[in-house]
Image (cartoon, rainbow, N blue to C red):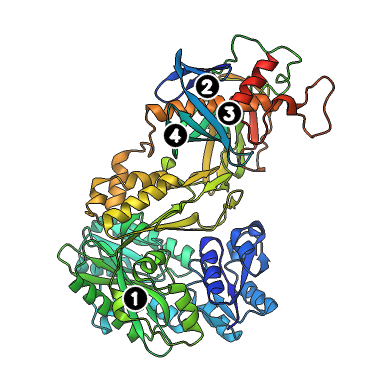
Amino acid sequence: MTFELATRSRTRKVESRGGQWWMDGRKVDVDAVKVGDASAAAWSVLIGRRSYEVAIAERAAGELIVHVNGRAVVVNGAATRFGTRRARPGDAGAGSAPLQSVRVLAPMPGRITRVLVKAGEAVAARQGLVVVEAMKMENELRAPRAGTVTDVRAVEGALVEANAVLIVIE
Amino acid sequence: MRKILVANRGEIAVRVIRACRDLGLASVAVYSECDRAARHVRLADEACAIGPNAPAESYLSIDRLIDAARKTGADAVHPGYGFLAENAQFASACRTAGLTFIGPTPEAIALMGSKTQARRAAISAGVPVVPGTEEPIGPGEPDDVIASMADRLGYPLLIKAVAGGGGKGMRTVTSAADLTSAVRAARSEAGTAFGDAAIYLERRLIRPRHIEVQLLGDQHGTVIPFVERECSIQRRHQKVVEETPSPVISPLMRTQLANAAASVARGVGYTSAGTIEFLVDDADRYWFLEMNTRLQVEHPITEMVTGIDLVEWQLRIARGETLDVDPMLANTPDGHAIECRIYAEDPDMGFMPSPGRIVALRAAAGPWVRDEGGIESGGEVPIYYDPLISKLSAWGPDRPRAIARMARALREYEVLGIKTTVPFFRWLLTQPAFLAAKFHTGYLDELLQQRRGEPFATADKEEEEAAVIGVALHLLSREASVAQPVAPGRLALGQRSPRDEVPTGRGDWKALARAEALRR
């Protein structure tokens, strides 16, 4: 599989095939073991002999916050490609299509004060979608990329848990 | 005294429950609805529901707490800090109900809780106070009278709430033109926060340090002051880092501060644990600021450099024991200790509260590190209460080595699911002025302002590479898990069993890669 993953500084092409890893075409010596609770996305990663603890805290589909030895790195995965293969109907992954659609999640528990878009509406990247209030602070959630709103689950006035899916964009 | 009701939650409730257990006393936790599964409830011997999430209906409800003590047969109450810890009505309600209040008397709480009365107590003990108005300024006081008081005092000055605390009802005024509107704002804030709009004026010292003296008093007239704590690292008047001893206090000055603190406390017949706060300037002049009539968040660092358990002594004093701590031991620091307050706040978003579920937590541990947390992995930081999730302390034979151990502990501290102030502390502990101990109470706010919202933890190139590899691993495992059925035993026709190929639980990426290859 090949991924195109953007951090603040640049976009990197990461390839994983048969246990081998390449970064921007350069072979890297990676050894990774999943650690901790099954529900926590955490790995011990050895790159060469350097030891990293990598843990993922999902903010919204398409954008991930990754802790590396305790430092947070924001990685944008919206441009992820899975090789050159296209998803076909009937593929195991096609039903939930986790990477084609972008789910906008509640960043914290709170109350929905405003819903700014409707299903079927086209949205531009960084367009405001929904406003969540928590601890007397208002937080406008924006579209991580351009697309069409396919699902509006946020209801004005409703209380939401952290990571509740509010809007889905395709 | 056999059974203690701990009228608090979170890390301080955990601390008190542990002290009870050390002394062989039974403990009763109380909890609001959202705290049913909280750590303090699970660690206590007994637990009692006290109402809904809103603090006023649970942890701040005197009636419900007294009722919980009755129902569980508790004979004493420890208030922790925050909530009702400095509420004289609560202490007196406990007394009326025949419960031992583990803290000072209601009279001492009421006296020192009034900032103007506390200043008078300091003056009569012969301790200098920050120049200011001696009588409370009531809501009816005309603006021109206040203006002439302010002129006599000089600018810049501070308006403070008589019933104040935690920076609420406090305003800095730099010129006469701003006085009237600042008085109005301070009165309204004080009225809302404390139900008392009375204020007073105090000269604003330039770049002072905040130095405080912990003390213990027993019911037989003994008061013992401890080595000072340096609490100048504050954000918006809230302490974030504390250390002891202060890097700028000489042994002579230590004795002076200790004597001043002890004479204020003796003068008001103080019992239990309390703290006298001072402001200290460059020329080693000191002024009484206020007294906290409770245990403090920063008590662990004093325990670390003296070996004296302050919470245990609170319990022993409450049951009438004689305080037999060696005064020399209490006032002579062994090494250096430092504490960082770990808050559920996002330092990169202006320290915005960050409540929510902690999906993974590894608290710091290791040699000479003490972490006192109120929450565990899988626990929830509720939106209703204080965001302090843990007090992290480290000890070293001297200041540089204490800081080095703290830096190591912060490097190990990992919290997933919510944001914490850990990255901020890692950054602060590298700042030259902090390392050189050249700071004052305004230092941190000034330093933060210079940063203009720059993120606290910037990863280097190697760490970014590790991050993208982590994301690739995450996406591979998520892709693999899509093939899993919702529930075992309900496999859809034509779908392969995930056991054949998908590494669940503790799989490694090699297995994931195989799974991916199989599906190709």
> Are there few (<14), some (14-19), or many (20+) residues within 10 Å of tag 1?
many
Residues under numbered marks 3 and 4 in contact, where contact means CB atoms less than 8 Å apart: no
How would you rate the neighbour count of disc 3 (Cα within 10 Å): few for under 14, some for 14-19, many for 20 or more?
A: many
Q: Which badge, 2 or 4, is on the more N-terminal residue?
A: 4
Front one among B429 and B153: B429
Q: Nearer the viewer, mark 3 or mark 1?
A: 3
Q: For the residue marked with disc 1, what is the amino acid?
A: Thr
Q: Amino acid at mark 4?
A: Ser
| Labels 2, 1: one chain | no
Residue B474 is labelled as: 3
Q: Which residue is mark 2?
A: A125
Distance of mark 3 from mark 4, alpha carbons? 18 Å
Give the spatial CA distance, label 3 vs label 2: 24 Å
Which element type, helix, strand or loop, lies under badge 3? helix
Which residue in the protein does label 4 denote? A51
Disc on the earlier residue, 3 or 1: 1
